[in-house]
Amino acid sequence: MKIDLHLHTLYGSACAYMDPDQLINRAKLMGLDGVCITEHNQLWDIEAIDRLRERHNFLVIGGVEVSTDLGEILVFGLHRPVLQVYSAVQLKKMVDEAGAVMIMAHPFRTEPELFSSFNLSEPDPNEFIPKGISTISNRPVFELIDALEVYNGRAGLKETAFNMAVAHHFNLPGTGGSDAHAILGVGACYTIFEEEIGDERDLIIQIKQGQFHGVDDRWQKDFQEEA
């Protein structure tokens, strides 16, 4: 199943420009099997998500993108207010109590110095990976999360390549999400799950079991050539 795990709407994110119906219609057009609406620090009501799913006959799952002291984190399965939650450790405690999951979103977007010098035409993991990863190896966030958002629709090629290297280094599964705030971005990146997903609980189970892989349609050809 192809599911875009990272999406915003104008109903819950002031920076977004599409309403939920536009989002879902675009997702269908892009060949997706489901979407996750992950507003900034704000949870959708479960009943509202159910109404969307029923109206469109399409898989819609609610999540949230939480701004923490260790970066922005996508959470699925938590149904408590998070607006006042800033500590990633506190968030992890809430997530564990709820049986939820955490995915670090666009992990290095604000640190271009980590990946800006990477030469994609002549990749040298023995040189590149230690230089960039050594500076982040002790960050506690990698002990808290269930997965890393490797493919983000707003990330460039070098940033994406670095995300891939970090996920490999820390043995973290990599997800894909468009991070779309407008309809044209929906489905640029997504996650393919091995088993059928019918609801939030199925999603959480497969994330915990690592039964998925991320896809970036924008850069897929480039990565295949590099491999």
Image (cartoon, grey):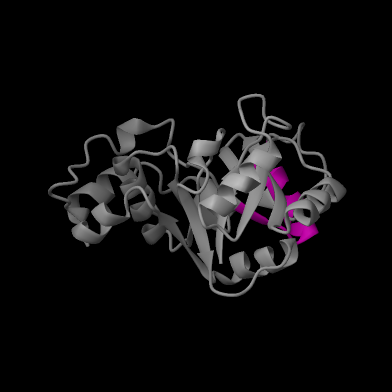
Q: Is residue 142 left or right of residue 208?
A: left
Please state the horizontal and vertical placement of residue 128, each as a whole percent of the image: 22, 48
Placement of the C terminus among the 4 image quadrants: bottom left
Is any atom of residue 149 visible in this view? no
Does residue 33 show up magenta in the picture?
Answer: no
Does residue 96 show up magenta in the picture?
Answer: yes
Residue plotted at (62% across, 42% down): 23
As drawn, 38 above or below 76: above
Q: Is residue 167 left or right of residue 92?
A: left
Q: Write down the region rendered in magenta.
A: 87-102
Question: Which quarter of the picture shows residue 82?
Answer: top right
Which residue appears farthest toward the right when viewing the image?
47
Residue plotted at (71% across, 45% down): 91
Is any atom of residue 7 visible in this view? yes
Q: Is residue 1 left or right of residue 124?
A: right
Please state the horizontal and vertical placement of residue 61, each as a whole percent of the image: 71, 54
Residue plotted at (67% across, 64% down): 204
Please state the horizontal and vertical placement of residue 198, each as a whole percent of the image: 71, 67
